[in-house]
Amino acid sequence: MKHKVRYLLFFFSAVLAGALIAVGVQALNSSNQPQPEVALEDILPPTIINPDDPVPTVASLRLTIQPAPAMPTLPPGSPEPTAAPLPEAPEPAALAADETVRFANDFSTEPEDWTFGQISNIEVAAPKWFVLNDERIQEVLFAPENAGRMNVLNDTMAIPPTPLGDAGAVEVSARSSGASKLGLVVGYADEQNFTAMIFGTPDAGGIGSDGLMLVQMEDGSPKVLAYDPELVLERGHWYLLRLEVEGNTIQASVDGAPALTATLANSLAGQQAGLYASHDGFAIFDNLRFVGK
């Protein structure tokens, strides 16, 4: 009985092994045989591209370039455009028959032996007077070529060495570009004793009030002799200013017209005369002269 069982097991094992061998041989033979080629056209159908079709774009990435505007051109031989003429300082008024010029300075050269005074001693804002050359004037101060201007910043005066005396007139062309006062001085003895014509913009402060005034300073205390609040300094405008003293009478004129007349509180403190300016804006002066009879 045992021999029959062994025989059957051996038989089935041999059959199974033969079957496995046959399958392996068949697989090996099939792998060695050449495979049929498959064309790309059989996988992806051909796509016909029309060259006239628009190229597809992504809307969010579309970039539109506008052509640059054409630059204007001048016809051949045309002159180059030039800026508008710059404003010029007015010339001094004609002298009366009985008047003579005692002193004159158009600031085309540096002033010599002048006194530059300061009413209040402010160290951080010391008075700054300087004469600008022609090129600098043209570029910054809108003044014409071949002319001098004296420029001032802060509460200060500029007094030439030539005295005016007890009687005579001081004349100057002046303008301002900011909140400031400018004017003329007579009877100057020092920074605390003088008499002045002061012309201010509506937003300027200081001695007296805004507008046009005549002020006599004695020992540092100002006294307003006459005042016109309606006649104010206009920024950027040139004025012809004149301050005349004769005896105890003093008169201020603007652009040839008498504006203020007053009586001095006391006699003039000194013999010298000159320029006055103060506050924020730049004051510009030209054609200063002393006139006597």
Image: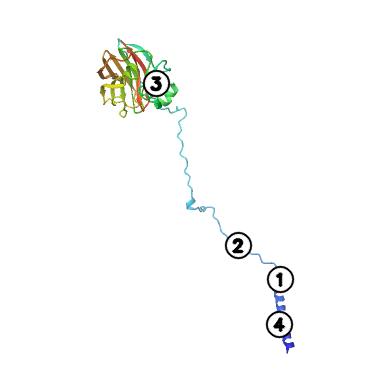
Return the residue at label 3: 150
Percent coordinates x, y for residue 49 in the rendering: 55, 56
Which numbered disc, 3 or 1, marks the residue that appears first in the sequence?
1
Q: Secondary structure beneath disc 3?
A: strand
Q: Do the residues labelled 1 and 2 touch (CB within 8 Å)?
A: no
Real-space CA distance between mark 3 and mark 4, rounded to the nearest whole angstrom: 131 Å
Residue lying furthest bottom = 1
Percent coordinates x, y for residue 84 in the rendering: 39, 27
Q: Secondary structure beneath disc 4?
A: helix
Real-space CA distance between mark 1 and mark 2, rounded to the nearest whole angstrom: 31 Å
Q: Secondary structure beneath disc 2?
A: helix
Please name which of the two marks, 4 or 1, marks the residue nearer to the observer: 4
Return the residue at label 4: 12
Work out whether residue 2 can be spotted. yes
Q: Are marks 3 and 4 in contact (CB under 8 Å)?
A: no
Which numbered disc, 4 or 1, marks the residue that appears first in the sequence?
4
Return the residue at label 1: 28
